[in-house]
Image (spheres, grey):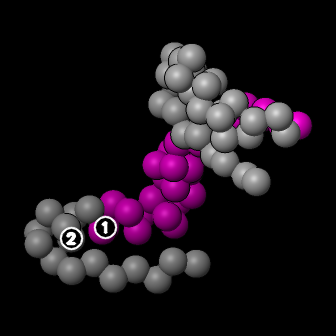
């Protein structure tokens, strides 16, 4: 069984979250891995070709134009 919890910050880890994990997995052995989620916008803007495409798409959207993109 595999479950992913997406939280906006570590501050959201409450006793309710812990209890939900306990309920879902009961007495089964589990492994907890904490991973910081990447900022998708920063990732996409990190590549010049993607950045150019995104900026163009935003401008087209502001003008009410349809946006067709060929993502590679």
Rendered location of residue 33, percent (x, y): 78, 34
Query: In the visual, does 53 lie left or right of 23?
Result: left
Q: How many marks?
A: 2
Q: Within the image, what quadrant is residue 53 found in?
A: bottom left
Instruction: Specify the label residue 56 is tagged with.
Output: 1
Please state which of residues 11 and 17 is positioned toward the viewer in this rendering. Answer: 17
Please report the residue visible at 75 percent of the width from the left and 36 percent of the height from the top: 26
Tell me, yes or no, if residue 37 can be seen here.
no
Residue that label 2 marks = 60
**Real-space Cα separation, disc 1 to disc 2, in angstroms:** 6 Å
Q: Which residues are magenta?
A: 29-57
Sort mark 1 into few (<14), some (14-19) or many (20+) by Cα contacts within 10 Å.
Answer: few
Rendered location of residue 27, percent (x, y): 82, 34
Asked whether disc 1 touches disc 2, contact meaning CB atoms under 8 Å apart, the reply is yes
Q: Quadrant of the N terminus?
A: bottom right
Residue 52 within the segment the image draws in magenta: yes
Query: In the visual, does 48 lie left or right of 19?
Result: left
Please state which of residues 4 and 20 is positioned toward the viewer in this rendering. Answer: 20
Query: In the visual, does 61 lie left or right of 1?
Result: left
């Amino acid at each position: 069984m595999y479950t992913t919890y997406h939280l906006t910050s570590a501050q959201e880890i409450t006793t309710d979250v812990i209890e939900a994990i306990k309920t879902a997995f009961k007495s089964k052995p589990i492994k907890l891995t904490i991973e910081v989620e990447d900022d998708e916008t920063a990732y996409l803007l990190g590549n010049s070709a993607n950045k150019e495409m995104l900026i163009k798409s935003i401008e087209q959207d502001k003008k009410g134009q349809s946006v067709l993109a060929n993502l590679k």
